[in-house]
Amino acid sequence: PTDNHLDFVAVKEIKKSKIPVSFLKLKAGKILTLPQGVHKPCSHVKVTPSKPSYVNVDGELYFDIPLEVNIVSNKLKIYR
């Protein structure tokens, strides 16, 4: 929470037959072992799909929503 970066992870288009295996890898935290897995540290991301698509946001699945995320520094206070 203090590095001012978002860990953006996406999966490029894959064959339908590969979706079950890819989903298992996602659940196991191994999605980046796939050649289609992409990881980009960033402070801003905007996803504009070419056709209506599903988006997984922090474990919640949404269909055909705009996705734009910005990192805002020093706005969340964490107490330990």
Image (cartoon, helix red, strand yellow):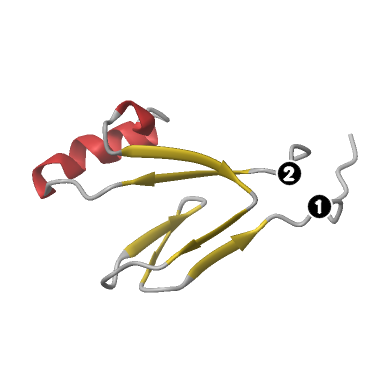
* Badge 1 amino acid: Ser
> Residue beneath label 1, please?
73
10 Å neighbourhood of mark 2: few (<14), some, or many (≥20)?
A: some
10 Å neighbourhood of mark 1: few (<14), some, or many (≥20)?
A: few
Element at badge 1? Answer: loop
* Badge 2 amino acid: Asn
Residue at x-position 39% and y-position 39%: 38
Q: CA distance from mark 2 to mark 1?
A: 6 Å
Give 7 or 44, whichever is nearer the viewer.
Answer: 44
Examine the rendered structure and indicate whether residue 10 appears above or below residue 62. above
Indicate the position of residue 71 as horizontal and vertical percent values.
Answer: 70, 55
Examine the rendered structure and indicate whether residue 40 appears above or below residue 68. above
User: Residue 53 appears in which quarter of the rendering?
Assistant: bottom left
Indicate the position of residue 22 as horizontal and vertical percent values.
Answer: 25, 38
Quadrant location of the C terminus in the rendered image: top right
In this view, which residue lies farthest toward the left? Answer: 17
Element at badge 2? Answer: loop
**Residues at marks 2 and 1 touching, judged by CB atoms closer than 8 Å:** yes
Residue at x-position 39% and y-position 60%: 55
Residue 25: which disc? Answer: none
**How many numbered badges does the structure rendering display?**
2
> Residue beneath label 2, please?
4
Quadrant location of the N terminus in the rendered image: top right
Indicate the position of residue 10 as horizontal and vertical percent values.
Answer: 39, 46
Give 55 or 38, whichever is nearer the viewer.
Answer: 38
Examine the rendered structure and indicate whether residue 26 appears above or below residue 57. above
Residue at x-position 59% and y-position 61%: 69
